[in-house]
Amino acid sequence: MADVEPEVRPTRTGELLSLYLVSRVGIFGLVAFSFLWPRYGSPRIPLTNHPIQLAVPMPGFLVPFMNWDAGQYVKIAADGYQPSFVPYFPLYPLLIRALSLGQRGWMAPVALLISLLATALAVVVLARLIAIDRPRAVWPAIALLLVFPGAIFFALPYTEATTLLFFVLAAYAARRRAWWLAGVAGALAAATRPPGLAIIVLLVIEYALTERPWRLRDLPALLLPAAGPALYLAYVWRAFGDPRLFLHGEQAYGRALGGVPVQFTTESTHLWTSLNFWVMVLALALALWSIRLLRPSYGAFAAVLALAGLITGELESTVRFIAIAWPLFMAAGVYLTDERRLFVVGTAFALGIGFFAILFTHGYWVS
């Protein structure tokens, strides 16, 4: 269990939001500049016949941000589910549809805005959560989180930002012993992305370590996150008549137990898979260290997310799983309170997120 640090000047919310705004402006500015580059500025997918542009009207400058899964979420919000979309969990498309008031022309801007606002709120809540035990780590942890290469998905119409927000809300509520609030936030995380179920690990361990005596009436709150996927799978069963459709859909996208060895034998993805494997190993080591450095609940939760690639059979999404594993950045922040170390690691991360941003918006798969 982590010792409480001496009193330090708290990091103000305005400072954190300023850092957030600078990082987002930097990402969007770099992307804009990349499209102006004379030789390499053309996107891989021409904007004039981009699939999502044809399905949902939107301003041209938003089209590069709608590649890959981003466009799928907007399509679900616009037209509802069909069997091929079942692997995409429902909360994010529901938010897009609700906040756009069902107007198709608003859906793409709203999808991006949800991610941007969710990230800002997550930063504020996470700062308060970290400050409970490690106030000195708040600034470096948030800085590293915002420029981590996988954090590019916080600036895209993807589910990572909303999942992160619900994760930190659940953890903060758990630290305040508001177990039902924590369970509700966890259920929302699990209804956004399948890895949201990892929050159960944090809630159960946190409860076991902090509550004496244990109360049977709190058990439903700790397991409430499972309600999110359960309700969605019940909908899939009723809508399509096959409760296994989700598993079939996951396999169609290459996500299944046993998929990792296959990836290592595929020549075209071997190098990228190997890099993701070693990133996963490093993240797992940091997560296990966090059990002692931070809190057992934090470290175990981060370890589950670090292993999510192996569990789902898709190592290529490792950086996305790590991006929402906030205890890893908290642990790194504890170690990198020295400004020189923070500058070196932060610069390396910033170069990585810039590279990912350019690749993604030009139509290349990054994770």
Image: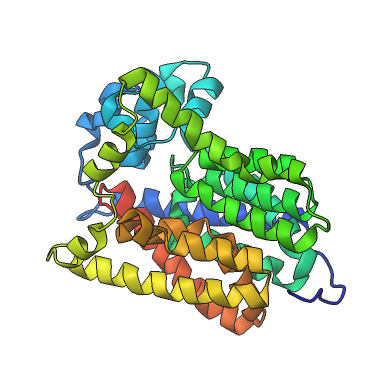
Q: Which residue sits at x=61%, y=54%?
A: 20
* 365 relative to 338 in the view: left or right: left
Q: If the image is split into quadrants, where does the C terminus sit?
A: bottom left
Can you give x and y, in whole percent of width and height, for residue 75 in the image?
35, 26
Near-viewer residue (294 or 94): 294
* 312 relative to 346 in the view: left or right: left
The colour style of the image is rainbow
Q: Which residue sits at x=54%, y=63%?
A: 302
Hey, which quadrant is residue 354 in on the image? bottom left
Asked if residue 329 is positioned above or below residue 18 in the image, the reply reads below
Q: Could one spot residue 244 in this view of the protein?
A: yes
Can you give x and y, in whole percent of width and height, for residue 275 in the image?
30, 71
Asked if residue 66 is positioned above or below residue 126 in the image, the reply reads above
The extreme top residue here reads 102
Can you give x and y, in whole percent of width and height, for residue 103 in the image?
46, 16
Q: Which residue sits at x=61%, y=46%?
A: 165
Asked if residue 349 is positioned above or below residue 43 in the image, the reply reads below
Hey, which quadrant is residue 268 in on the image? bottom left
The extreme left residue here reads 267
* 127 relative to 344 in the view: left or right: right
Near-viewer residue (37 or 341): 341
Can you give x and y, in whole percent of width and height, for residue 194 in the image?
45, 44
Near-viewer residue (143 or 160): 160
Asked if residue 205 is positioned above or below residue 180 in the image, the reply reads below
